[in-house]
Image (cartoon, rainbow, N blue to C red):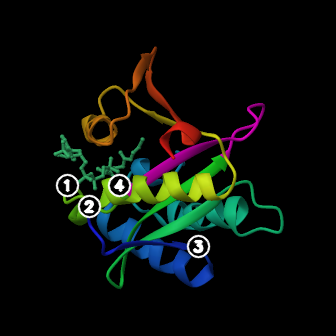
Amino acid sequence: MRSDVTMQQLDEDLLQALLDVAVADADPHEVMPPVAGPAGWTAERRAAFSRFHQSRSLSAEPVETTYAIVVGEAVVGAARLCPLEGAEHAVEAGVWIGRSYRGSGVGRAVLSHLLILARTEGFDSLFLSTKPDNTASQRLLSAMGIDPVREGDAVTAWVDLIAAG
Ligand SMILES: CC(C)(COP(=O)(O)OP(=O)(O)OC[C@H]1O[C@@H](n2cnc3c(N)ncnc32)[C@H](O)[C@@H]1OP(=O)(O)O)[C@@H](O)C(=O)NCCC(=O)NCCS
């Protein structure tokens, strides 16, 4: 497991670094909800990326915790933990990593950190969801001993944080 991967809770400075990485090293659809308009990192999409994180993680009443993924000194992506409505002590995890850092074990280290963070924050179970064509995500789960199941247009997995601890 890589030991040079750390997670830093998002703040305004890290958000700017995160936007820079997203624009330079990821596609919008990998890192944010859809925004209408021409493809690519338009001014509208950059602004929407910042607003998305400000409203969800940096507001007075955040709905999720977002972490900048840091390798050495470099911000390379983001991960999030979002408590699931209607499922007590359950949290959904998400992650994206910049293209130039994919496939080198960062995702595996991030998922390990997320499991520990979620457990430390008092959650009992962690939910993950991806698309059937996202081979990297499914390989990542398998490599961590997590068995995903196909549910229609999604591939999902639940991790029992109590048993896994
Ligand atoms: C999915 C993602 C987070 C995986 O992170 P990563 O750092 O690339 O993954 P790792 O290098 O830790 O690899 C974990 C496992 O997946 C495999 N893997 C990684 N990328 C792969 C790819 N493109 N195709 C097939 N397998 C892949 C690795 O071989 C490894 O398996 P192994 O241990 O059995 O060899 C990353 O690719 C990413 O950010 N993708 C774009 C955004 C995204 O899809 N996010 C998830 C949405 S649910």
Q: CA distance from mark 2 to mark 3?
A: 24 Å
Between residue 79 and residue 160, name the one nearer to us: 160
Q: CA distance from mark 2 to mark 1?
A: 13 Å
- Residue picked out by circle 1: 103
Q: Residue furthest top?
A: 152
Q: Nearer the viewer, mark 2 or mark 1?
A: 2
Instruction: Kindly state the secondary structure of the residue where label 4 is placed.
Output: loop
Q: CA distance from mark 4 to mark 1?
A: 16 Å
For the residue marked with disc 1, what is the amino acid? Answer: Gly
On the image, which quarter does residue 160 sit in? top right
Residue 130 is situated, as x and y percent measured from the top left of the image, at 42, 34
Check whether the beta carbons of the residues at disc 4 and disc 3 lie within 8 A of each other: no
Compared across the picture, whether 57 is left or right of 67 comes to right
Which stretch is magenta? 83-96
Instruction: Kindly state the secondary structure of the residue where label 2 is placed.
Output: loop
Residue at x 40%, y 49% (from the top left corner): 30
Residue 57 is situated, as x and y percent measured from the top left of the image, at 68, 63
Sooner in the amino-acid sequence: mark 2 or mark 3: 2
Q: Residues within 10 Å of mark 3 (few under 14, many from 20)?
A: many
**Is any atom of residue 126 visible in this view?**
no
- Residue picked out by circle 2: 1
Q: CA distance from mark 2 to mark 4?
A: 27 Å
Question: Can you tell me whether the CB of the residue at mark 4 lies under 8 Å from the nearest atom of ligand 1?
Answer: no
For the residue marked with disc 3, what is the amino acid? Answer: Leu
**Is any atom of residue 138 visible in this view?**
yes
